Image: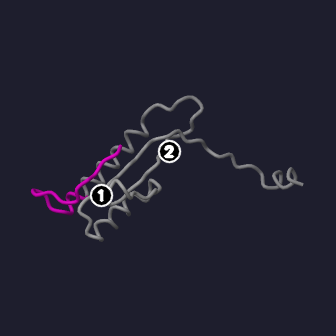
Amino acid sequence: MKKIFPLSAPNHQPPRVIEQIKCELRKYLKRERKKSLPEGVDFWDFECKIGRDQATPEAKHVEELIPAIDEAVAQNASAIYVEILSKPGYRKTKGDPLLKKSAED
């Protein structure tokens, strides 16, 4: 998803527009997470970027999207650019730290 969201609409109150944007992002993430996983993949991971315009987006974690929108509203931005791309995610194995140290020696 690559989209520019205007933070104001002529027939809607600004707080409702912000909530609509947040709701749309949450629904998109939920829909993407429900898709079947390819073989060998543990979960869907997301590359997220957010910014005032398409030229200057910052990379953010999924959990930082909603606070970033609130920050843009506090800075009186007229629109916000959001880019969310799904990618396969793999869990990292937690090894025994003692085994790792002995293997390095």
Quadrant (top left, top right, bottom left, bottom right) of the C terminus? bottom right
Which of the 4 quarters of the picture holds residue 22?
A: bottom left
Q: Which residues are magenta?
A: 1-18
The residue singled out by tag 1 in the image is: 80
Q: Residue at x 23, y 59 (%)?
A: 7
Classify residue 75 as left or right of residue 15.
right
Quadrant (top left, top right, bottom left, bottom right) of the N terminus? top left
Badge 2 marks a residue whose secondary structure is strand
Q: Residue at x 33, y 49 (%)?
A: 25
Classify residue 53 as left or right of residue 85.
left
Which of the 4 quarters of the picture holds residue 19?
A: bottom left
Residue 37 rendering spot, x and y as whole percentages: 50, 32
- Does residue 75 sit above or below 56 in this rendering? below
Query: Residue 11 lies in magenta, yes or no?
Result: yes
The residue singled out by tag 2 in the image is: 45
Mark positioned earlier in the residue sequence (2 or 1): 2
Q: What amino acid is found at the position of numbered circle 2 in the picture?
A: Asp
In this rendered view, identify the residue nearer to me: 50 or 99.
Answer: 50
Query: Residue 30 lies in magenta, yes or no?
Result: no
Q: What amino acid is found at the position of numbered circle 1 in the picture?
A: Ile
State the separation of the CA atoms marked 2 and 1: 22 Å
Q: Residue at x 53, y 40 (%)?
A: 43
Residue at the front extreme of this rendering: 55
Badge 1 marks a residue whose secondary structure is strand
Nearer mark to the viewer, of 2 and 1: 1
Q: How many neighbours does mark 2 have within 10 angstroms: few (below 14), some (14-19), or many (20 or more)? A: some
